[in-house]
Amino acid sequence: MKILKKLFLLVAVLSFAATAPAQAKDSLVLDGSTTVGPIAKSFAAYFTKNYGVQVTVSESGSGNGAKSLINGACDIANMSRGMKDAEVAAAKSKGVDPVAHVVALDGIAVVVHPSNFVSALTTEQIRDIYRGKVTNWNQVGGPSAKIVVIQRESNSGTQDLFRSLVVGKKNPITKRAETQASNGAVKSRVATTPAAIGFIGLGFVDDSVKSLSVDGVKPSVETVKDGSYPVARPLFMVTDGQPTGNVKKFIELNRTEDGKQMISELGYVNKY
Amino acid sequence: MNLGTRKILDRSFTAVGVTSIVLMALALLVVLVPIISGGLKALFFQGTIEHRQLVYNEFGRGDREELERQKEQSQEARRPVFAMLDAFDAELEGMEPAERREYRSQYNHVRDVLHDMLGPLPGDIEPLLLRFQYGNTRWEQAEESLHDLLYVTKWDYSNPNVMAEKYFTPRVDEFQGTALAPLFAYVETHLEEMLLPQPEFYWGFITDRSLDAHIFGGIWAEIQGTFYLAMGAMLFAFPLGVIAAIYFTEYAKDNFLTSMLRSANSTLAGVPSIVFGLFGLAFFINTVKVSESKSVLAGSLTLAIMVLPTIIRAAEEAILAVPKTYREASLGLGATKWRTIVTVILPAALPGIITGAIISLGRAAGETAPIIFTAAVSVGATIGLADVFTEPTPALSWNIYNLASEHEAANEIRHVQYGMVLSLISIVLLLNMSAILLRARISKKLKG
C-alpha cells in the first residue's frame, strides 16, 4: 500500500508541477523545407542570441511546412517552391492568407560520384536520364555503367522544381528511380554509389560529390545570381498575412548585413 | 524411437540452442561495440586549442590564464604560416593576370583548408556562423584537414569506359617556386604546435546546449526532451492502462462487445508507429487543439496511445495471474469487490504490471515516428517543466535521424550522432534499471 501511495503522490506532484502557470514568452515556430533548413537554423541561433526570442525549427519538407502553416501550427513555413494552387485554396478556406517572402536564391546542382568521367550534361540529357530513356552512362559519354537514378520524395520542393525545370511537369520519372528523403540523404547516397545521379541544393554540395555543368554552365553563387545557371529557384519563407513584430524581424533578417553574410557563408545566394 | 536417436536429437537441439544464443550475442556485440566506441568519442577525444577556446567563450569554463598562455604559444607557431600567406599575396599582385588566375583557385582552396584548420585567417571577414569562427576542435579532424592541405585529390579519367580511380598528388607541386611552397612542409611539421592537442573529457556534451545546429556543444535539450516525452507518456498511459485492465478482468462480462474490445486492443498493439504519429497530429493538434502547434503534451499523448495496448495486455495478464485464493480470502473476510481489487489484487499484480510499463517506457523513449509531427523539432532550446503544454522540444530519437540524413554537415559530426545514440541507450537502460529495482522492492515486500 505504501508504494501505491508513493506512486500516487509522485503523480500528484508531477501534475501539480505541470500545471504551474506557463510564463508568457515570445517564441517563433518554423517548419518546412530541408533545403531552407540550414538558413532557418542559423537565423534562429542568431535571432535567439540577439533578440532573446526562442526559435524552433523543424525540417519536414516543403509540403509539410505548407500544411503546418495552413493548420496554424507554425509561424513561418520554409519552402523551396511556391505554394501550389491547392495549398493556397486550403489556406484560404481556413482563413490563412499565405504571403511568400524570398529568403535567398538557390541552384539545384545535379551531382554524380567524383569517379564519374561525365562532368557536363545538357538539360535534354538529364531529362532523358530521369525519364528512363538513357539508362547507361556510356550513352552520354561516360563509362559503361548502369545509371542509378536518385530522386526526392513527392513532399519535396526541390523535387517539384526539378521536375518542372528539367524533366517537365507532365513527364513521369522512371520507375527505377530511387527515392531519398532529404538533400543530405541524396548527397550521401551519391557519394557512396559510383554510378548514381542525383540533385541537391547548391548549399549542400561539397567535395564528396561532383556537380555537373548543365547546358555548359557550372552551378555556383555567381551563375545562379546572374541567372545563367538554368536550374535555379528562389527559396521562400511563407507567413500568414503580412508579417508583424518578431516574425517581420525574422523574415527581414536576410536584408541585413549579418543575414546576407550568413546566407553566403552557408553557400546560398543572396537576393538583396 | 530408440535411445540412440533420442540422444542425437537431444544433442542436436542443444547445439542449435547454443548456436542461436551465440549468434544473438555476436549480433548484439556488432551493434553495441560501434555505438559505445563511437559514442564515447563525443566525450573523450584529443581536443585542440580551438576546442578549449570555444568552451571558454561559449560556456565560460576553463582556466583563463592557461588558455591565454596556450593561445600565445599557438599564435607563435602560426605566425610563419600567416607570413607566408602574406608573401604569396604580394607575389600574386605582381603576376600577369593569366598566371594569377591559374594560381587563384588553387590558392583559395589552400586558404579554405587553413581556415577549417586554424579558424579565420588574417584578412578574412569575421564569420558570423560559429562553425566558421573556430578551426578544427578535434585532432582527428585536424589530421583530415592536413591531408586535404598536403594532397590534391585527383581522379584518373584516362580510361573513359570504367569508373575512375582516386589518387593523390602533393599539393606543393602546384606552388613550386613560389613563396607558398615552404608552407606545406611547415604546416605538416608544426601542426601540433599550432593546435596543441591534448586529451579532453568533454562532459559538457551531456549538459551543454547545442551550438550552431549541433556542430558544437552538447545535447542537453535532446536528453531533457526525451525524458519529458517518455515520462509524460507513462503519466497518461500507466493509470489508463491499469484501469482498463481492471475493467477487462474484473468487471467486463464475457460477451461479444468485450471480445471485440480485446481484439481491438491487440490490433492496436500492431499498428505502425507512424500511423499513431499522424493520428496524433490530426486528433490532438488539429481537432482537440491541446496546443497551438507541436508540443511535448501532444507528443506525450500520442506516445501514450501507442504504448497503451502493451500496458493493458501486461496488466491484464498480471491480474489474471493473481491466485484465485487471494480474492476468495478477501471476499470471504467481507471486503467489497472494490476493496479487494485495490488492497489485494493490485498489489499482488504490481510486479507484472510494472514489467509491462518498463517495456513501454523504453519504447516511448526510443520511438521517432509518433513525435515527428507532434513534438519534435531539429533545433530548439531546453524548455522548463511549465512549457511542456505549449512548446515543442528536440528529442534524441528524432535528432539522431535528423543528423544522420538531413543535416548539412552530417559527415563532419558523426561523433555527435553516435553520442546521441549512446545517450539514448543509456537513458533507456537507466529508466529500465530503476523500474526493475522498484519491482524487486515491491516483490520483496509482498513476500515479506
Image: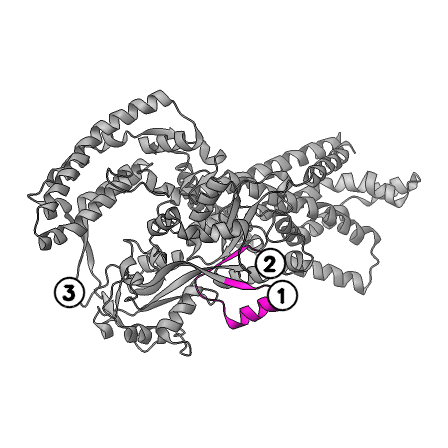
Whether residue B12 is visible: no
Q: Quadrant of residue A37?
A: bottom left
The residue to which callout 1 is attached is A94
Instruction: Identify which amino acid the numbered label 1 is placed on.
Output: Lys
Camera-side residue of B233 and B382:
B382
Instruction: Identify which amino acid the numbered label 3 is placed on.
Output: Asn
**Label of residue B159 in the image:** 3
- Which of pointers 1 and 2 lies earlier in the amino acid sequence? 2
Query: Which residue is at a point 82% across and 56% down the rendered structure image?
Result: B252
Q: Which residues are magenta?
A: A71-99
How would you rate the neighbour count of disc 2 (Cα within 10 Å): few for under 14, some for 14-19, many for 20 or more?
some
Q: Is residue A72 magenta?
A: yes
Between tags 1 and 3, which lies in front?
1
The residue to which callout 2 is attached is A72
Camera-side residue of B89 and B307:
B89
- Residue B444: percent from the left, percent from the top? 71, 31
Instruction: Identify which amino acid the numbered label 2 is placed on.
Output: Gly
Alpha-carbon distance for marks 1 and 3?
60 Å
The reply, left or right, for residue B105 in relation to residue B262 is left
Query: Which residue is at a point 74% across and 37% down the rendered structure image?
Result: A12
